[in-house]
Amino acid sequence: MSIGILYERSETDEMGIKLTARELGINLAYIPFRKVAVCLDKNGYSFRSKGKTYSKVIEDVHVILNRGQSKNRRLFAANILEALGKYVINPPRVEFICYSKLRTILHFWKEGIKTPRTVYVPCDSHEPTMDGSEIHNEEEIADLIEQELGNRDIVIKPDAGTHGKKVKLAKAREDLLTILGETEPSIINPVGILAQKLVQKWFYDLRIIVAKECGKAPHCYPTALARAGFKDFRTNTFLGNMVFGVNLPPYIKEVAVKCGETIGRDSKAWLIAFDAMIDVGENKIADDEPIKAEFEKLESPFNAVKKIKRKGTKKRDFLNWNKKLEEAFQNYKNQEAYDNIKRIIEESVERNKHNILFHEANACPEFWEQTRLVAGINLAVPLLRCAQSVIDSDYGG
Ligand SMILES: Nc1ncnc2c1ncn2[C@@H]1O[C@H](COP(=O)(O)OP(=O)(O)OP(=O)(O)O)[C@@H](O)[C@H]1O
Ligand SMILES: [Mg+2]
């Protein structure tokens, strides 16, 4: 029995998983999930593209790494594969919770894990009526949100958004009304408004990896990826923020494991990336200005990294491109400013560790370009280990 990998497009993460599998001597079977037809009838199922049948490939694998890019596609893939008797990493339950920020926060909250103060209003900002006009609910929604969060510094975000898209900050009621007016029910926010109190996180947030192999306790990786910058309140990497590998205090690793157990629950094997913010508030350990100066020193080496990331050769000549990326990251990490900022973040995390707030879980984290090279975690390894552990457990090794 072997391992499969499913995706719609092979990006660097998928190329990285395939490369890692080759290095580990693991044979990975490819299962496409875009221009294929999955057909179910009384005789069984078929899984076919126009030219090829994949049913046999699927029969021969026991565990499948689900690398569908969109959350919806990934959830459907997980449901289909599970129905076909496969173990999917991650299992549908994990995908389903991670899909929604509200669902994730509800699970954390139930377990007593601290989250940002969150408000959900199950009402859209404007609604069409039968006679073709529109009802506007912005004022009432704003009242409801302000009743819970006060009238300053409110973050509005789509429930299932990614890459910081449409995550907006309202500094005062006027902004809040404008932002609410711009919201539309969509695939990433089917109904209502999700709002949060702005966490005073200083200039960084954290991505923490927890994985569970079958038969073992969940493991939190000791290094997290800190995303940092002063340009925007959103410090996620997609917006071009810089990244640092920071060591985590034992307390935070324990809470992260609890987050994993909450979402992974009874599943045998899973891998989840958690996003967390630290409510630093006024407890800053240094002034902003000298830190901003350190960021400036890193601008040029980090731009060199970004330039390579944008290069079109990554698919055509992956190995060469990968080598260039590794060199650029190494040069960035060799800067004194990198160490200085990393140290400040580590000290700030240590001092404020009890104020950590978990707010999101990612079931299919990107890792090849940053988590691997900055935090030193090649997620392809635990993903493949998790898969192998399920095979060993179900087929006796
Ligand atoms: N309540 C909050 N207080 C302060 N900052 C926040 C808050 N919510 C989100 N942010 C900032 O905005 C960024 C994007 O928010 P969030 O993670 O919710 O969106 P996303 O679309 O899932 O982004 P990504 O896919 O990069 O994780 C976070 O990395 C964080 O820095
Ligand atoms: Mg996020």
Image (tube, rainbow, N blue to C red):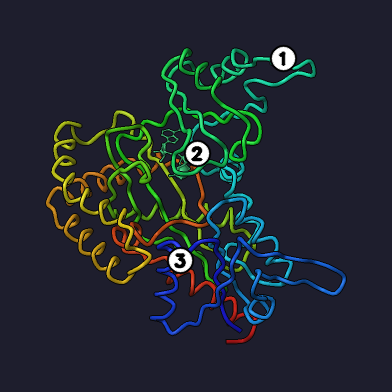
Residue at left 63%, top 77%? 62
Residue, disc 1: 133
Spatial CA span between label 3 and label 2: 31 Å
With 207 as the anchor, is 103 left or right in this view?
A: right
Badge 1 density bin: few <14, some 14–19, many ≥20, Cα 10 Å: few
Q: Which of marks 2 and 1 is nearer the N terminus?
A: 2
x and y percentages locating residue 142 in the rendered image: 56, 17
**Viewer-nearest of labels 3 and 2?**
3
Compared with 123, 306 (above or below) is below
Compared with 343, 40 (above or below) is below
Residue, disc 3: 14
With 364 as the anchor, is 355 left or right in this view?
A: left
As drawn, the residue found furthest toward the right would be 42
Residue situated in front as seen by the camera: 121 or 279: 121
**Viewer-nearest of labels 3 and 1?**
1
Tag 2: residue type?
Thr
Q: Is mark 1 within 8 Å of ligand 1?
A: no
Residue at left 62%, top 62%? 35
Say how many tags the image has. Answer: 3
